[in-house]
Amino acid sequence: MILVTGGAGFIGANFVIDWLAATGDPVVNLDKLTYAGNLENLATMKGDPRHIFVRGDIGDSALVDRLLAEHQPRAIINFAAESHVDRSIHGPGDFIQTNVVGTYHLLESVRGYWSALPEAEKAAFRFLHVSTDEVYGSLAADDPPFAETKAFEPNSPYSASKAASDHLVRAWHHTYGLPVLTTNCSNNYGPYQFPEKLIPLVIANALAGKPLPIYGDGMNVRDWLYVSDHCAAIRRVLEAGRPGETYNIGGWNEMPNLDIVHTICALLDELRPDAAGPHARLITYVKDRPGHDRRYAIDARRIERELGWRPAETFETGIRKTVAWYLDNQAWVGHVTSGAYRDWVGRNYGDRA
Ligand code: NAD
Ligand code: TYD
């Protein structure tokens, strides 16, 4: 049994689905079901007794203590977080509450449970914390990519809150001996990503004939990691990573935002042509994000050298699968973007024109 937190969100849901397919081992899935968590992401596991869903907060110590005592997991994978940079700019409070305070409470619950385990189980136990490359800050065009030794220089409320959580996880290892693993990955993309992030937003807007908003000059660079590659990397780190160690996970796919958007437009022109003209006609430059990090890039050589993991997808293969998934799952997009999503679009894009 493992306990996954945030498993109704984008990466967590992909992880749970892939985990059951790859290992068959049962999962308790603890998720608060914020706007970003959707039970529809877990629909393929409905009725599967190996998947137990519990709605709740990682900061609810009484609940987490009870779940740990009841299910006796051999590992925790912590995905639960507030994850969107633009939302952290509009309202940082939830980011501090979940990413910092919530992680602290979770660590304390896990420490209490772990310290009472028999010696063999204690040694085999793992707490894997899923974090981001954004903790490392922003790179200039000719800087080397982020290695695990790079000092943290977070620039947004989101990345600062994730950096704080990484520090807590590190401290719980050094001080209390908790067997932790931390992963810092680049931008994920793939099925079930909430359409507030660049790739699903551009697909959804292009299909609806709406503007494709490009912040600033569109030349900010991200590294893009296909979500199932990320899930495989996490399984590998859990299996063979050294406690106390950090592993950077990347896709070896650095690209400027504008290239991402043009690639999506070309795929949609091929798969779902629009009589009104090429989808790229919808590209619209809008006011930049405050403090917008210029470039992220991951040096993923440690995980390859020590654990033998490399991404299986290139950007070309991954983005084709992703666009095809969104075309086949328009009902999912319709459901998750009803209601509160519209308020968010108004708040984030209303004053950028
Ligand atoms: P997401 O926003 O899609 O999902 C987050 C999930 O956590 C949601 O289901 C939400 O309901 C749940 N959650 C939020 N607060 C909670 C709380 N207090 N208690 C329990 N559950 C809570 O995020 P994602 O994109 O799947 O990201 C998962 C993790 O990976 C996050 O920690 C994020 O920082 C990290 N990460 C994401 C990316 C990316 O590109 N998406 C890149 C690097 C790192
Ligand atoms: P995003 O998907 O929000 O991920 P992150 O900020 O965590 O990297 O954004 C990816 C890049 O795309 C980032 O440089 C901001 C940019 N972007 C736009 O240009 N327009 C948009 O509407 C969004 C959401 C993002």
Image: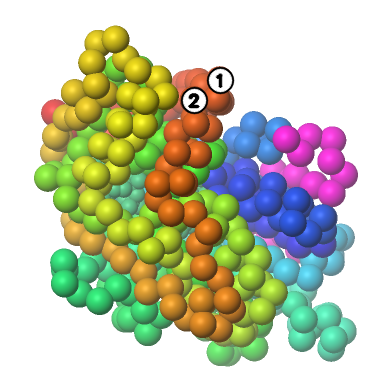
Residue nearest the observer in this picture, 283 or 324? 324
Residue drawn at the location 19% of the way across and 23% of the way down: 281
Q: Label 2 sits on what residue type? A: Leu
**Mark nearer the viewer, 2 or 1:** 2
Mark 1 lies on residue = 331
Q: Residue at x 25, y 76 (%)?
A: 144
Q: Quadrant of residue 113?
A: bottom right
State how the image is colored.
Answer: rainbow
Residue indicated by mark 2? 327
Q: Is residue 174 above or below residue 192?
A: below
Residue 244 on the magenta segment: no
Q: CA distance from mark 2 to mark 1?
A: 9 Å
Q: Which residues are magenta?
A: 44-66
Query: What amino acid type should be assigned to the residue bearing mark 1?
Result: Ala
Question: Are the residues tagged 2 and 1 within 8 Å (C-beta)?
Answer: no
Q: Pinpoint residue 309: horizontal percent, then vertical percent.
A: 56, 71
Q: Nearer the viewer, residue 272 or 50?
A: 272
Determine whether the residue tagged by mark 2 lies in a helix, strand or loop: helix
From this view, report whether residue 154 is shown above or below residue 327.
below
User: Measuring 38% from the left and 63% from the top, which residue is drawn there?
Assistant: 252
Note whether ligand 2 is within 8 Å of mark 2: no
Point out residue 61 in the picture as x, y percentages from the top left corner: 68, 61
Q: In the orientation shown, which residue stands out farthest toward the top?
A: 275
Question: Residue 32: image x %, image y %?
Answer: 61, 45
Q: Which image quarter is the N terminus in?
A: bottom right
The quadrant in which residue 78 appears is bottom right
Q: Picture coordinates of residue 171 (x, y %)?
A: 52, 83
The answer to whether residue 51 is above or below residue 58 is: above
- Relative placement, left or right, of 307 versus 302 is right
